[in-house]
Amino acid sequence: MGLYGIFFNEFGRLRSGWRLAFYAFLFIAATLLLETLLRVVYAIGQAFLPPLPFAGYFANMAFRFSLLAAALIAGYFCARFFEGLPWRSLGLTLHQGWVRDLIIGTVIGIAALAAAVGIATAGGGLRFSFIGSGMLLSAGRSLLTAGALLFVAALAEEAAFRGYPLQTMTRAGLMWLGVIVTSVAFGSGHLWNPNVVPGVTLANTALAGIWLAAAYLKTRSLWFPLGVHWGWNWALGPIFGLPISGTRLFSNPILKGDDVGPAWLTGGSYGIEGGVACTIALIVFTLFIWRTRLVGPTPELLKLTSEENPATPPRVSVLS
């Protein structure tokens, strides 16, 4: 193969492993830079402005937007510079059927979470009580505000993991390796959450990564996995009142979920994502997504994400 072949493929383009490494470096660098800028702005605001209502909520929203921006900036740079691909290759344009993909994905995400809750409840591990008619207005507001935050948070994670990293590995003919790498990275990124269940948290979250990767590969667009991801989290917190990845983020859910165990089934203090009920639901709905005919890719997105792109000259040239 020689030194040239270690770094470049037959089209003269940087190999997918190196592209993935550059993406990770750029994403981390952009994240640190944007987070530092946000901290500076937040500190200045606290020093010179009066206390603002919902400051914590908007700070959290700004942080999620910074992660989204970092993923898209790094992804577009790598797609354009290393592969000569346009912005639309990232799968986040308003292509034909994007609204349908998002809606169907959301319904599937809610249904999967409801299945996990149903399994845990049938096993005697969860009990629910209604929040009460006097709190419906507060619950409605929580549904909207929580939904907005969870939407941006899910979009940031989809762009970071099912965006360029999975796409570039798929173009290189390494789809299954890309699914494994991005899913393990997705699971590892949740290990610093509160109340982590050793082993189970990584396994279930990595399995969720495979579920979401299947959703991306089904459409080659980020809208469908975004809907799946967002629908799951939206049902989990604001509707069923359960922890999201170890944290109770929102008050005034429609239902108040109480965990009465056993923890192996329900996930205990981490929430249902740390239990076997979640594992079963994720396996079933991964198979459903992989086999469903409800959604599919546009011809252009399928081509942009299925093969190396030799159409334009590589940006990097070296002597062979």
Image (spheres, grey):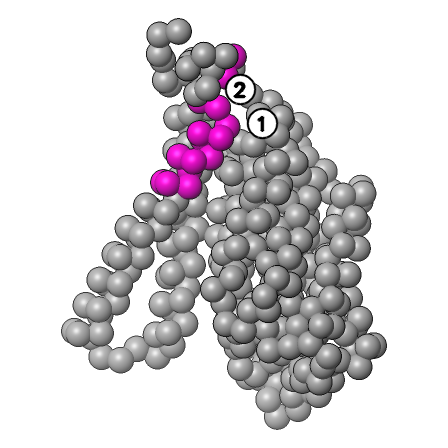
Q: Is residue 39 above or below residue 220?
A: below
Secondary structure found at label 2: loop
Q: CA distance from mark 1 to mark 2?
A: 8 Å
Q: What x and y, as percent, mark residue 217?
A: 66, 39
The quarter of the displayed image where residue 220 is located: top right
Quadrant for the C terminus in the image: top left
- Would residue 244 be visible to someone looking at this image? no
Q: Earlier in the sequence, mark 1 or mark 2?
A: 1
Which dot marks residue 256?
Answer: none
Is residue 227 toward the left or the right of residue 58 in the image?
Answer: right
Residues marked 1 and 2 touching at CB (< 8 Å): yes
Range of magenta residues: 9-26
Q: What x and y, as percent, mark residue 142?
A: 54, 76
Q: What x and y, as percent, mark residue 95?
A: 59, 38
Q: Amino acid at mark 1?
A: Arg
Is residue 72 toward the left or the right of residue 258 in the image?
Answer: left
Q: Residue furthest top?
A: 320
Label 1: which residue? Answer: 171
The quarter of the displayed image where residue 305 is located: top right
User: Within 10 angstroms of label 2, few (less than 14), some, or many (20 or more) residues?
Assistant: some
Label 2: which residue? Answer: 309
Give the residue displayed 76% in from the left and 54% down from the top: 283
Q: Amino acid at mark 2?
A: Asn
Is residue 236 toward the left or the right of residue 68 in the image?
Answer: right
Q: Is residue 266 above or below residue 217?
A: below
Q: Is residue 70 above or below residue 247?
A: above
